[in-house]
Image (cartoon, grey):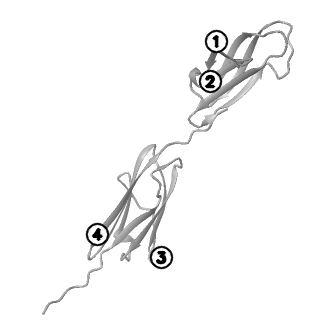
Amino acid sequence: IRYLKSVTLPQVDIVRPSDKATEDARVNLRAEVKHVSSKQNIQVFLNGKAIRDFRFDSRGHLVDSTFTFRDGENKILVKVSNRDGRDEDQHTILYVKAVAPPVVKITSPKNNATFTKAAIEVQATVNGVTNKNEIKFYLNGKSIKGFSFNRNRLVAKVNLKNGLNTIAIKAMNKGGRD
């Protein structure tokens, strides 16, 4: 005669977040849990630190929590246990902070201004870039390198041609261009 004890092993599956990378710092965790009857048999970790304020719905067999990622790689680990055994699931997600595209505003000269001297100063504010290499300055379609950029302020001394002149300033960063 043989007696085989019925064994019901616990199971856990992290279903959210499912992405490998995100630009969202606030993350909602959802894990499906089977054969676990109590929150005391569940452990949630973010980057090795225990998260205690998670919710467990024993009827729906779900674990939910919300937390904030740090820059770079983040590890979510959910462990479950019952009298018959243990299980765990882990996801690694890369958090990359979203970057807004730059914003360029020419402050001087005003659009459609008229000058009696060819030498003028162009001024602009350029937000969302950190250095001059992320900015392109054009006068009448020709790239101009001789401008300064400091603390979001661009200044260039240019010589206008007789007639209509066009000034264009373009900036680019990881978030896009303006």
Q: Give the residue at mark 1.
A: 146
Disc 4: which residue = 86
Residue appearing at x 64%, y 28% in the figure: 171
Q: Which residue corresponds to the image point at 62% horizontal and 23% vertical from the top-left?
A: 135
Disc 4 residue crowd, few under 14, some 14–19, many 20+, Cα 10 Å: some
Q: How far separated are the C-alphas under marks 4 and 3?
A: 20 Å
| Left or right: 166, with 14 as reference point | right
38 relative to 159 in the view: left or right: left
Neighbour tally class for label 1: few under 14, some 14-19, many 20 plus, Cα within 10 Å: few
Q: Tag 3: residue type?
A: Gly
Element type where label 2 sits in the image: strand
Q: Earlier in the sequence, mark 1 or mark 4?
A: 4
Spatial CA span between label 1 and label 2: 12 Å
Marks 1/3: CA distance? 65 Å
Position in image of residue 124 (x %, y %): 71, 22
Under mark 4, the amino acid is Arg
Place residue 83 in its image quadrant.
Answer: bottom left
- What distance separates the C-alpha of mark 1 from that of mark 4? 67 Å
